[in-house]
Image (spheres, rainbow, N blue to C red):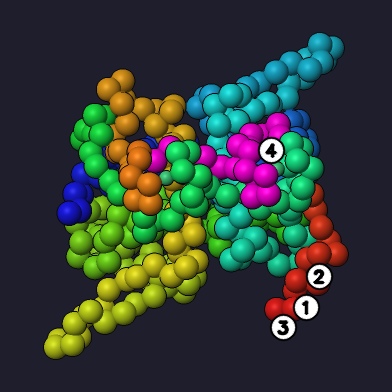
C-alpha cells in the first residue's frame, strides 16, 4: 500500500534543492564537457555575468564545484567538479539518454557517448547491481528505510525557474528536460506517479500542494506527453493520470538523483527508502553501465561525441 511518507522522505527533494534550477543544470552540463573558466561558461551559455556568478557561488557552497587558483599574477580562479559533483554523473547520463530518446534539442547535433573501456559508441543503461536486469519502475518495490523521518516538503520549494525564455541555442539541453527538472514542483509531481499515485486528490494530499499549482503542472506534463489522462470511473466521469513510456523513462534519472541525495545528504541511520528489485527479489542498488559492455560508467570513462551527420539522418527518418 502507498505510504505518503515515502514521498516526503525521498532524497530526490534534497538533490533538487541543490540542482533544481535551469541554469544550474546547464552549468553542470558544461562542467562535464570540461569547461572550467568563468568566461568560457559565460560565452557558451550566453548567461548574464551576475546570474553566472550567483549560480557558481551556489554550486561552490553546496560542494559540487570547487574554486581553484590557476594563475597567480593576476590571481585567477576556475571551477572544478568535486567528488560530490562527479557523483551526479550517473544522473547526467540518464538525463542525456532520456533527452536523446524523447526530446532531442532541435537543430543540435546528436550527442553520443563513447565508453573508453570498450571503445564503443553506446547508450548508458541503468541496471540492478545484483541481477544486472534493466531497471523498470514497474518492478521496483518500496519500504520505509531506517532514515525515514519527517522531511518537511512544503518550505522553500516553490522557487520558479529563473530562465523563463528559451536558453541559448548553443546549449545542447532539451527545453523539455529543463522544464521537467528545472522547477521545484514538476519532478515531484512526476515522482508521485512513480510511487503509484494516479488521482489528483491523492497527489495533492501527498505533496501538500495548492490545487491550482498541481493542476497547472499536470496540465503541462500532459502536454509534454509525460502523462495521459484516462477515465477510471463512468458515472460521474473521473479521470486519473497515467505515466506514458516517455514518463516512465524519467524514472532512472530520478532514481540516480535519489541515490546521490542518499549518499550526500543521507541520515546517519540509513536511507529513508529501501528499494527492492522485483525481478530478482534483492535490494536494488542501481548502477549506470555501458549499454555495450556492461561496465559501470564514471565521469572519467566516458567522452561526449557530437554527431552532426547522424542527427541529420535521424531527423529525416522522422518525417
Ligand atoms: Zn535485480
Ligand atoms: Zn563499454
Question: Which mark, residue 32?
Answer: 4
Residue closest to the eye, 231 or 212: 231
- Please state the extent of the stretch shown in magenta in the rendering: 284-301
The residue shown at (21%, 44%) is 5
- Relative vertical location of residue 211 with respect to residue 318 in this rendering, above or below: above
**Mark 1 lies on residue:** 316
Q: Position of residue 237 (x, y in %)?
A: 20, 85
Q: How far apart are marks 4 and 1 (CA)?
A: 30 Å
The quarter of the picture where the N terminus appears is bottom left
Residue 120 is at least partly visible in this image:
yes
**Mark 2 lies on residue:** 312
Q: Distance between the residues labelled 4 and 3?
A: 32 Å
**Mark 3 lies on residue:** 319
Q: Distance between the residues labelled 3 and 2?
A: 11 Å
Q: Where is residue 128 in the image (x, y as percent from the top left)?
A: 46, 43
Q: In the visual, does 72 lie left or right of 32?
A: right
- The answer to the question of whether label 4 and label 1 lie on touching residues, with beta carbons closer than 8 A, is no
Q: In which quarter of the image is residue 32?
A: top right
Under circle 3, the secondary element is loop
Which residue is at the far top? 72
Q: In which quarter of the image is residue 177?
A: bottom right
Q: Earlier in the sequence, mark 3 or mark 2?
A: 2
Q: In terms of image quarters, where does ligand 1 lie?
A: top left
Amino acid at each position: 500500500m502507498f505510504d505518503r511518507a515515502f514521498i516526503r522522505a525521498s532524497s530526490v527533494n534534497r538533490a533538487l534543492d541543490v540542482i533544481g534550477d535551469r541554469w544550474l543544470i546547464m552549468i553542470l552540463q558544461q562542467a562535464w564537457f570540461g569547461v572550467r573558466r568563468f568566461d568560457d561558461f559565460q560565452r557558451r551559455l550566453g548567461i548574464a555575468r551576475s546570474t553566472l556568478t550567483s549560480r557558481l557561488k551556489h554550486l561552490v557552497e553546496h560542494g559540487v564545484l570547487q574554486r581553484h587558483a590557476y594563475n597567480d599574477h593576476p590571481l585567477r580562479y576556475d571551477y572544478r567538479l568535486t567528488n560530490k559533483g562527479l557523483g551526479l554523473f550517473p544522473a547526467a547520463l540518464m538525463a542525456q539518454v532520456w533527452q536523446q530518446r524523447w526530446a532531442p534539442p532541435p537543430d543540435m547535433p546528436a550527442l553520443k557517448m563513447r565508453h573508453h573501456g570498450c571503445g564503443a559508441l553506446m547508450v548508458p543503461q541503468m541496471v540492478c547491481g545484483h541481477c544486472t536486469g534493466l531497471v523498470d519502475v514497474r518492478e521496483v518495490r518500496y519500504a520505509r528505510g531506517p532514515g525515514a523521518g519527517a522531511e518537511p516538503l512544503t518550505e522553500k520549494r516553490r522557487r520558479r525557474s529563473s530562465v523563463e525564455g528559451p536558453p541559448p541555442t548553443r546549449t545542447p539541453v532539451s527545453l523539455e528536460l529543463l522544464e521537467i527538472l528545472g522547477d521545484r514542483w514538476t519532478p515531484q509531481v512526476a515522482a508521485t506517479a512513480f510511487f503509484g499515485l494516479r488521482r489528483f486528490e491523492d497527489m495533492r494530499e501527498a505533496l501538500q500542494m495548492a490545487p491550482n499549482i498541481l493542476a497547472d503542472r499536470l496540465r503541462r506534463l500532459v502536454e509534454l506527453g509525460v502523462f495521459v489522462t484516462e477515465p477510471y470511473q463512468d458515472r460521474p466521469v473521473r479521470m486519473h493520470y497515467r505515466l506514458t513510456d516517455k514518463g516512465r523513462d524519467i524514472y532512472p534519472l530520478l532514481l540516480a538523483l535519489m541515490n546521490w541525495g542518499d549518499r550526500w545528504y543521507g541520515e546517519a541511520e540509513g536511507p529513508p527508502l529501501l528499494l527492492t528489485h522485483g525481478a530478482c527479489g534483492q535490494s536494488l542498488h542501481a548502477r549506470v553501465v555501458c549499454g555495450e559492455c556492461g561496465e559501470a560508467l564514471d565521469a572519467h570513462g566516458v567522452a561526449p561525441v557530437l554527431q552532426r551527420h547522424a542527427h541529420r539522418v535521424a531527423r529525416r527518418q522522422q518525417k
